[in-house]
Amino acid sequence: MARHRIFAMSFASIYVMYVQKVERKGHTTAELDQVITWLTGYDDAGLRRVLDSEIDMETFFAEAPAMNPNVSLIKGVICGYRVEDIEDPLMQQIRYLDKLVDEVARGKKMTSILRGSETAGI
């Protein structure tokens, strides 16, 4: 089975698109970073290191300090697929992040986006 090309794309290039999306909708990079750190366990310094190193999406998720234990609470449709039904674990992690970014862009409350937690991290 062929690997999806998004797996090899640099996280930094995807991050730029996320920033454009949330800022276009009147939200901040800080909000974006908060959902990324909540999901992956990267701290601010770790996220900056990842962005500077140009690692790919596969490595970004493989090296994530700790996926949030509430990740299973992320439900809904993204890119035409229900995130909870995606079978490939890496693609599911990518789509979880896409879903969170969409929620930030739509202006959903941060406590709702973070599935009830007030802060980033686990």
Image (cartoon, helix red, strand yellow):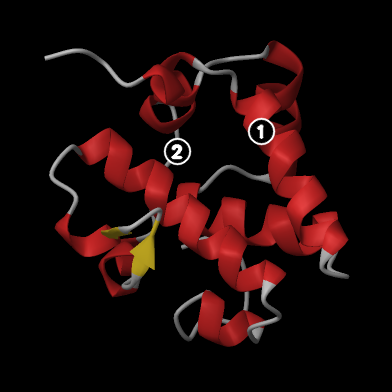
State the residue at coordinates (66%, 14%). 54
Number of disc labels: 2
**Image side of residue 78 versus residue 47, left or right:** left
Look at the picture and state if 95 lies above or below 23.
above
Contact flag, marks 2 and 1 (Cβ < 8 Å): yes
Residue occupying the far front of the picture: 80
Cα–Cα span, label 2 and label 1? 9 Å
Look at the picture and state if 21 lies above or below 108.
above
Looking at numbered disc 1 in the image, what kind of residue is underneath it?
Answer: Gly
Q: Which residue is mark 1?
A: 46
Q: Write down the quadrant of residue 49 in the picture.
A: top right
**Reading the chain from its start, which is encountered first: label 2 or label 1?**
1
**Residue 20 appears at what percent x and percent y?**
81, 47
Q: Write down the quadrant of residue 76 in the picture.
A: bottom left
State the residue at coordinates (53%, 85%). 112
Looking at numbered disc 2 in the image, what kind of residue is underneath it?
Answer: Pro
State the residue at coordinates (65%, 87%). 109
State the residue at coordinates (45%, 38%). 65
* Residue count near mark 1 (Cα–Cα under 10 Å), binned few <14, some 14–19, many ≥20: some
Look at the picture and state if 87 lies above or below 122.
above
Q: Circle 1 — which element?
A: helix
Q: Write down the quadrant of residue 28 in the picture.
A: bottom right
Q: Circle 2 — which element?
A: loop
Q: Which residue is mark 2?
A: 65
* Residue count near mark 2 (Cα–Cα under 10 Å), binned few <14, some 14–19, many ≥20: some
**Image side of residue 30 versus residue 36, left or right:** right
**Residue 121 appears at what percent x and percent y?**
54, 60
**Residue 120 appears at what percent x and percent y?**
60, 65
Look at the picture and state if 117 lies above or below 57.
below
**Residue 38 appears at what percent x and percent y?**
54, 59
